[in-house]
Amino acid sequence: MGRRPARCYRQIKNKPYPKSRYCRGVPDPKIRIFDVGQKKRGVDEFLLCVHLVSWEKENVSSEALEAARIACNKYMAKHAGKDAFHLLVRAHPFHVLRINKMLSCAGADRLQTGMRGAFGKPTGTCARVRIGQVLLSVRCRDAHAPQAHEALRRAKFKFPGRQRIITSGKWYVQGVHLVLSRGVPEGQERGTCSPRWIQCQDGWDAGRVPAFGLQVFERSDEDMQTHYTGSCSIIHGHGLGCPSAGSAPGAGGLRCTFKHPNKALLRAVRIVDESTKKAVAVDPVEPEKILKAAGEVGAYVDCVLTTHHHWDHAGGNEKMRLQVPGIKVFGGSLDNVKGCTDQVENGTKLSLGKDIEILCLHTPCHTKGHISYYVTSKEEEDPAVFTGDTLFIAGCGKFFEGTAEQMYQSLIVTLGSLPKSTRVYCGHEYTVKNLKFIMTVEPENEKTKQKLEWAEKQREANQPTVPSTIGDEFEINTFMRVDLPEIQAKFGANSPVEALREVRKTKDNWKG
């Protein structure tokens, strides 16, 4: 009789696999809860997504998944708060593990329950995961990014093999999107990697997994976002490859062109002084596209303006500093803006070239140091304001770090005091959704009905609904109409601030 595999030689004083004695069928998986936390929070509130990605092809038991879920949930609940995150276990243990008792003592052939490789008794369940598959995902606010990373780092210890933690802007994605294929990708030299390659969609950066010899593409934080495009020579938008929707020359070399969106909700800005060709980038999450667009009109980026510290606005600052050495990055003094070199406060004045002036306006509430930028020519004609996440078309930002009193001051007093003709460029294009909500609050508002019909036609034609004007917002935006007695009466409020608080609460709970 030939020698048996080493796995057959075990401690024979103990009974082999005592667990199998009690298994009469496929046991239930140990993990029952896959979705934990604030499931109904919107993507505009939990902007940050962090994924734990498997870096090996392996089996992950249901016990390991449950242990990782408990470890991650416990840490996030303790250090971020029960209401501050949403945790999802993405791997499901559908695969059944089976065993056969194998002994090495005398009479083993009569005591064993089957030959090696035979179909044995079920002993548990596991998830079969591939390289690049997401195991756990956490979404939360930007402020809790360190806690999310630490929670997933602790969860890593519950799994075999290797994992990576990847920060993303998308929730329902495969953290690292992999497609195995044969051959060499276009633009790569033969012999620089294994014959097997991993290819993926455009916008992913290449990186190597040393142990496997595979070419892997990871999406960067900026590319994981979905973006709208806008422009201003003033150019306003992420994803600047979209065709132009038109332009409107202004006085003093301040020309405004808006490029239409193709899929998204975010925007960056480039402001160009036509006389000197100096440009300012506002919230440049995709620096490469901003720089490319600036080069197409013969301009160069002179500095960066950041409205607030959230990653979907400040996430490209450090990359911009690497690509444009010595560039100044402005941000609010009360905000912890990533990559900021120069802090600004309410009333700080900046200039671009000879003709464009920029006034910094402190508009707190969404974040405590949020800055809006009021842009005019020397003659103060054709003004524009870039409101970040404070004022949207027919809406306003959530009260993440402030109060209703602060939002009232920001919307009605600070922004509301600007000329009614001031064009409003906001940080996200939620126009249609916001207008549908307004119609539930003010169904009798004819101007809102007309604006909604126009906005839906614009979106059907893949055209932008931004900019609006301050004057238009006072007519269609309930958040800016809380001074009206009829609005206060609708919400049973005794003051504009109380009405604003109730409108925001109603919008947060609206399921439209």
Image (tube, grey):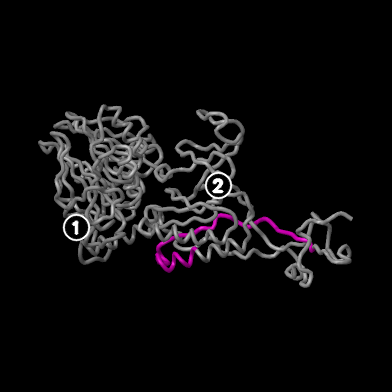
The image quarter containing residue 262 is: top left
**Residue 284, magenta (yes or no):** no
Seen in the picture, residue 236 relative to 19 is either above or below; the reply is above
Q: Secondary structure at mark 1?
A: helix
Q: Residue at x 77, y 71 (%)?
A: 15
Q: Position of residue 415 (x, y in %)?
A: 19, 50
| Residue 23 seen in the figure | no
Numbered range of the magenta stretch = 72-101
| Closest to the observer, 125 or 457 | 125
Question: Is residue 409 shown left or right of residue 104?
Answer: left
Q: Position of residue 453 (x, y in %)?
A: 33, 41
| Closest to the observer, 266 or 345 | 345
| Mark 1 vs mark 2: in front | 2
Q: Which class describes the residues within 10 Å of circle 2: few (<14), some (14-19), or many (20+)?
A: many
Amino acid type of the residue that numbered disc 2 sits on in the rendered structure: Gly
| Residue 98 seen in the figure | yes
Question: Is residue 144 shown left or right of residue 26?
Answer: left
* Total numbered badges shown on the rendered structure: 2
Q: Position of residue 380 (x, y in %)?
A: 12, 38
Q: Residue at x 47, y 50 (%)?
A: 166
Amino acid type of the residue that numbered disc 1 sits on in the rendered structure: Gln
Q: Residue at x 63, y 57 (%)?
A: 93
Give the label on residue 132, or none. Answer: 2
Give the label on residue 409, or none. Answer: 1
